[in-house]
Amino acid sequence: MPKILFLLAGVSLGAAFAQAQTTVTNEPGGGSDWSFSVSAYSYFVPAEREYVQPTFSADRGWLHLEARYNYEDLETGSAWVGYNLGGGETLEWELTPMLGGVFGNTTGIAPGCKGSLSWRKLELYSEGQYVFDTDDSSGSFFYNWSELTMAPTDWFRFGLVTQRTRLYDADRDIQRGLMVGFTFKQLDVAGYVFDPDESRPTVVIGLRVDF
């Protein structure tokens, strides 16, 4: 919990220095200002080390930049550059193909992609990447996080979540679970329970601030 509070304090300080806040257009060349997002996901894994996974992203028009820590491995960072695409009216879609470099306990190159489909109150979101481990090819792995949610109101959503990761040992290759999320202005809070049918499921608490 102290780690989360420390990170949120840093987010608030960063927001105070941000001079431009606008929604990024997905058309190439569109959008003259930057938008930023900072998130922290706290993992409570049974019989294993608890950890926090922070992510920082910046967008301007078609350009997407992102930095992560403790995503591909503990004490491992990654830096990404991507291209924002999007469109649709009744069925809205967004897609960001990316390329990243991974460094730390795991070192490698990672092509990836994130995207979403939204229809009325339903949204499907997914992000995935394949890490080519340049030190040990047996360490190469496909990571994925996906959510299918329904939002009865603008501030509340719930749904299903899946995850595939090598960051900790799990009984299942793809973990499945339930999620619930709340949004208040620029702050988003979400809770996840993976493998709820297990005697000791994995719990994840996510916080995100957009500015």
Image (cartoon, grey):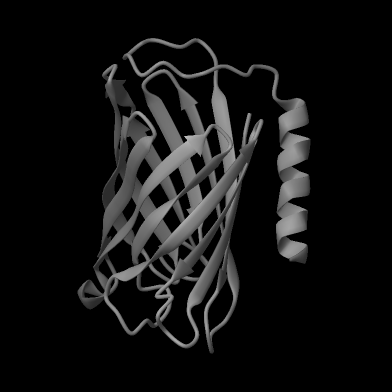
Depth order, front residue of 128/157: 157
Q: Quadrant of residue 35?
A: top right
Q: Which percent across, then down, holds residue 129?
A: 28, 54
Q: What residue do we see at 77% from left, 56% from top?
A: 5
Horizontal side of residue 105 vs 184, given as left or right:
left
Left or right: 60 as drawn, with respect to 35: left
Residue occupying the point 58% across, 36% down: 155
Going by the picture, which residue comes out furthest to the left?
Answer: 137
**Left or right, 144 with reference to 187:** left
x, y percentage for residue 28? 31, 14
Which residue is more in the foreground, 145 or 72? 145
Relative placement, left or right, of 57 versus 121 is right
- What residue do we see at 55% from left, 21% from top? 34
Count the marks. 0
Work out whether 81 lies above or below 107: above
* Picture coordinates of residue 147, whole percent (x, y): 36, 51
State the quadrant of the C terminus.
top right
